[in-house]
């Protein structure tokens, strides 16, 4: 995780912090509104669209990471089953499939109640976790939709995080 230099102040908008993180990584981004930013982040499997939006009423910084997916209609039950199995293995967000838009979606909400301020490192990690989850489970979704694997077998292909040293 990269260190991002940023001046902390009570007046800093969460999307300003996200913009600094995106600029630090040289990700293509577009500030869509005062409370929303969209960026493109390159992964190993594909490019991911990442949008973060701040809701002051709920005091939540919402992250949505998407990638295109147009599974065959007859494979949708398998996809939904592997989605349920996948979501049982993650702690910091969850996947859903938006059928009409043909998008696989990773969602996460960071609660910043009581005037809490997210650190740049925290936002950087939040974005990286989203990309890592998409990268980890992308092959599972592919096998469930275009392979002959059962949802359980498709999930077996997910690369787990390695611990320790060899």
Image (spheres, rainbow, N blue to C red):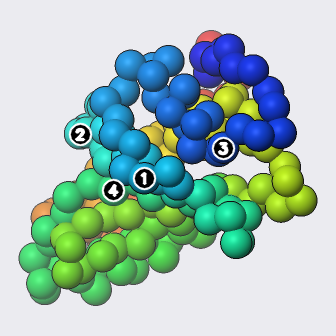
Closer to us: mark 3 or mark 4? 3
- Residue 150 is tagged as none
Answer with mark 3 or mark 4, whichever residue precedes in sequence: 3
Provide the secondary structure element on which disc 3 rests. loop
Question: Residue 31: x percent and y percent?
Answer: 40, 43
- Determine which residue is flagged by label 4: 66
Q: CA distance from mark 2 to mark 4?
A: 11 Å
- Give the Cα distance between marks 4 and 1: 19 Å
Number of residues whose C-alpha sits closer than 10 Å to that of mark 2, classed few (under 14), some (14–19) or many (20 or more):
few
- Tell me the CA gap for discs 2 and 3: 30 Å
Q: Where is mark 2, residue-wise? A: 46
Q: CA distance from mark 3 to mark 1?
A: 12 Å
- Earlier residue among tags 2 and 4: 2
Instruction: Name the residue carrying label 1.
Output: 33
Vertical comparison of 14 with 125: above or below: below
Q: Nearer the viewer, mark 2 or mark 4?
A: 4
């Amino acid at each position: 995780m990269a260190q991002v230099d940023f001046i902390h102040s009570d007046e800093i908008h969460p999307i300003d912090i996200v913009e600094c993180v995106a600029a630090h990584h040289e990700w293509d981004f577009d500030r869509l509104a005062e409370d929303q930013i969209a960026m493109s982040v390159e992964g190993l499997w594909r490019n991911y669209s990442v949008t973060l939006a701040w809701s002051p009423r709920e005091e939540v910084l919402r992250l949505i990471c998407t990638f295109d997916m147009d599974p065959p209609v007859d494979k949708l039950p398998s996809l939904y089953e592997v989605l349920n199995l996948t979501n049982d293995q993650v702690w910091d967000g969850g996947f859903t499939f938006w059928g009409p838009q043909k998008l696989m979606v990773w969602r996460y909400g960071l609660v910043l109640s009581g005037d809490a301020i997210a650190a740049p490192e925290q936002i950087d990690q939040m974005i990286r976790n989203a990309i890592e989850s998409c990268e980890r489970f992308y092959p599972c979704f592919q096998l469930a939709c275009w392979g002959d694997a059962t949802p359980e077998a498709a999930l077996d292909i997910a690369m787990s995080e390695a611990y320790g040293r060899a």
